[in-house]
């Protein structure tokens, strides 16, 4: 289950050390310990896509802004894409 308070702390910790952007996969790793892609899973059924949707829904509370997608790899080396979020200053 996604926890808004934990995500606020995550993005604030990044902000406090000058990090200006983060991937959805970074937030997933922070919360779950690892990021593994849901290969061959439609986005509507993917927990990772749902997590990204949660970030999108709570951009204002997290003080982040969607900035596009970038290629990345999961913990198993599988290629995937991840949203990148601009971390806005307070």
Image: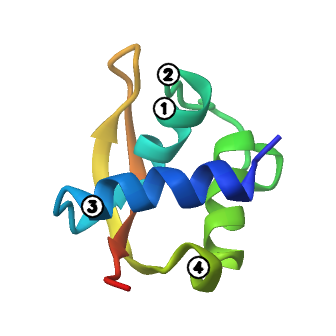
| 10 Å crowding of disc 4: few (<14), some (14-19), many (20+) | some
Between the C-alphas of marks 4 and 1, the distance is 18 Å
Q: Secondary structure at mark 1?
A: helix
70 left or right of 53? left
Looking at marks 4 and 2 on the same chain, the residue that comes earlier in the sequence is marked by 2
Q: Residue at x 40, y 27 (%)?
A: 74
- Looking at the rendered structure, which numbered label has been put on residue 34? 2
The residues tagged by marks 2 and 1 sit, at their Cα atoms, a distance apart of 4 Å
Mark 2–mark 3 contact, CB under 8 Å? Answer: no
Q: What residue sits 69% from the left and 56% below the top?
A: 5
Question: How far across and how far down the image is residue 67, in percent?
Answer: 35, 79
Q: Which residue ends up furthest to the top in the rendered image?
A: 76
Q: Tell me if label 2 and label 1 are in contact, CB under 8 Å.
A: yes
Which mark sits nearer the N-terminus, 4 or 3? 3
Residue 18 lies, in percent from the top left, at 16, 63
Residue 82 on image: x %, y %: 42, 53
CA separation in Å, label 2 and label 3? 23 Å
Helix, strand or loop under label 2: loop
Instruction: Classify 15 as above or below 30.
Output: below
Q: What element does badge 3 sit on?
A: helix
Q: In the rendering, which numbered label is found on residue 59?
A: 4
- CA gap between label 4 and label 2 equals 22 Å
Checking the image for residue 16, the label placed there is 3
For mark 1, what is the residue?
Answer: 29
CA–CA distance in space, label 3 to label 1: 19 Å
**Reading the chain from its start, which is encountered first: label 2 or label 3?**
3
Depicted 78 relative to depicted 41: above or below? above
Q: Do callouts 4 and 1 mark residues in contact (Cβ within 8 Å)?
A: no
Q: Nearer the viewer, mark 2 or mark 3?
A: 3
Q: Residues within 10 Å of mark 1 (few under 14, many from 20)?
A: some
Asked if residue 23 lies left or right of residue 1, the reply is: left
């Amino acid at each position: 289950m996604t926890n808004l308070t934990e995500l606020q702390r995550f993005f604030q910790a990044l902000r406090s050390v000058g990090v200006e952007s983060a991937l959805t996969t970074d937030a997933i790793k922070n919360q779950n310990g690892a990021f593994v892609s849901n290969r061959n899973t439609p986005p509507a059924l993917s927990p990772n896509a749902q997590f990204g949707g949660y970030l999108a829904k709570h951009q204002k509370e997290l003080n982040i802004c969607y900035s596009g997608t970038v290629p990345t790899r999961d913990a198993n080396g599988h290629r995937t894409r991840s949203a990148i979020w601009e971390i806005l200053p307070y």
